[in-house]
Amino acid sequence: MRLWHGSSRNGSVNAVERAVARLRTAGFIAALGNGLTGVVLSVTLSQALPASAVAGSLGALSVGMLISFAAGGKHADMSDRVSSMVHSDWVRAGMNLLIVAGVLVAGPAGIALAVAGCLGNGLMAGFFRPAQSSLWASIVPRNRLSATLATNSFVNRLGLAAGGALGGVLLAVRQNVLGLAIDAGTFIATAVIVHALRDPRKAAANRSEEPQAEAVARTWSRVVERLRVDRDWADILALTRKSTWMRLWFICNLNMSWAAGLTSVVVPVVLVRQYSDGEIGLFQSISVIALLAGSLIALLVRRIPGAGVFDAWSSVGSALSYLAVGLGARAGLASAVRFTSYFSQSVASPRLGAYVAEQFPERERGRIYAAQQGVSGVLAPVGMLAGGVLLTWSDPQGVLVISSGLCVLFGLIPLVNPAYWDLKVTQAATLTERHSVPQMNEPKSSA
């Protein structure tokens, strides 16, 4: 059976291995950039811009994700995923440089540049991530997917750890802006690496017959057509009904997103006021060390018992770490709680990715991956706007205590459904499908 266009069985195996190696290399580089920016972005904005501008910039990032994630999931289900990833990375490189310019330029012009850069970055992330996740599920044979995702998780966490460590060093020596510039370079590198791949679902002949200019115009017209946010998220919510636990998880994370948005605006302000540069670097960078440790466990223990419990703690523990910051706890205690949260996230991540491939047919996976990765930002702009207002007249520590406490509550609710504890697969038709290997030029079968 053929896995790769124009290949024999042995050749197809080699082609899959080459594609996996290329995607994994790109993933490592992208993770390095993510780890770096995840550590330095909010602190850099807080040090360079007024609190209201920080709220506006982070809010713009979240608005971009809100607008694009559901549309990006549909785009991944219907279009060339490799092209989506490449185009998104080139644009995100430019957006990062806009953010760099924003923190270097004083006054309203700098704020406008930072907001524009964050908005563009959020928009492109919504098209990149679902395409990346669903591409993995198409390239790798189903019987190898769980093991491959566990290895991916470990490799990506190595990149995140390296980026996070570098970000912590840059924070300590006050060279935060350099981290954002380096991240722009990682986007360019991953775009070049991924460009050589082909989407297994898309026949090469169909792509070559259409002139490039017409193909680009048609692709972007589809993108614009799909930017109907309310309809797209309603469509994703309807798909989650196929899972006995995901609908409740989705609704709770949707509600948590506004409280998390509020928290994300307030916490960097409290960190800068309350802790030294070294303590901030520890708190921000320990997350990627935890991700690396958790991914190692996921790599060694291929079937994690209670993966849903680990997933729940990833939200609850993160909120508790922010609660500790709001209550004025020592940086070491807050960092330790944060470590357990990101450790749990990394342990659960491969199982969550495999669950989507087992529970849902390929024509729906892009939207479900979009739900997993984007639901936390749906109502975040509301919380960020509220945070910007509250920072003008309220004590940020008190606001942080309330918002992080709400996140703890929403993170615990999905555990009332026992099917969530082990991320139970319940759709029999899809269980049958996962044992077959898809043809290169055909969509995977589904009931």
Image (cartoon, helix red, strand yellow):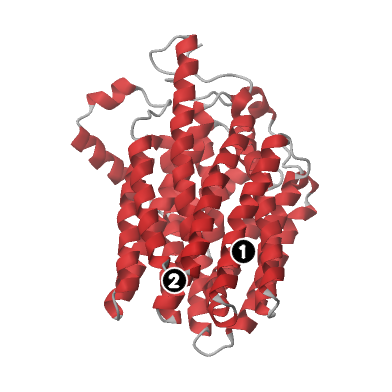
Question: Residue shown at 52%/24% (left/top)?
Answer: 444
**Coordinates of residue 285 in the picture (x, y in percent):** 57, 61
Give the residue type at disc 2: Arg
Q: Is residue 318 above or below residue 24?
A: below
Residue under pointer 2: 174
Judging depth in this view, the residue of 172 and 271 nearest the camera is: 172
Q: Is residue 158 above or below residue 111?
A: above
Rendering quarter of residue 7: top left
Q: Is residue 392 above or below residue 198?
A: below
Relative to 414, 253 lies left or right: left
Relative to 366, 239 lies left or right: right
**Residue 225 appears in view:** no
**Coordinates of residue 194 in the picture (x, y in percent):** 38, 36
Circle number at residue 104: none
Q: Is the residue marked by circle 2 packed among few (<14), some (14-19), or many (20+) residues within 10 Å?
A: few
Secondary element at tag 2: loop
Secondary element at tag 1: helix
Pair 1/2: label in front: 2
Which quadrant is home to the C terminus?
Answer: top right
Give the residue type at disc 1: Asn
Q: CA distance from mark 1 to mark 2?
A: 36 Å
Judging depth in this view, the residue of 287 and 70 nearest the camera is: 287
**Residue 102 appears in view:** yes
Residue under pointer 1: 255
Rendering quarter of residue 51: bottom left
**Coordinates of residue 184 in the picture (x, y in percent):** 35, 54
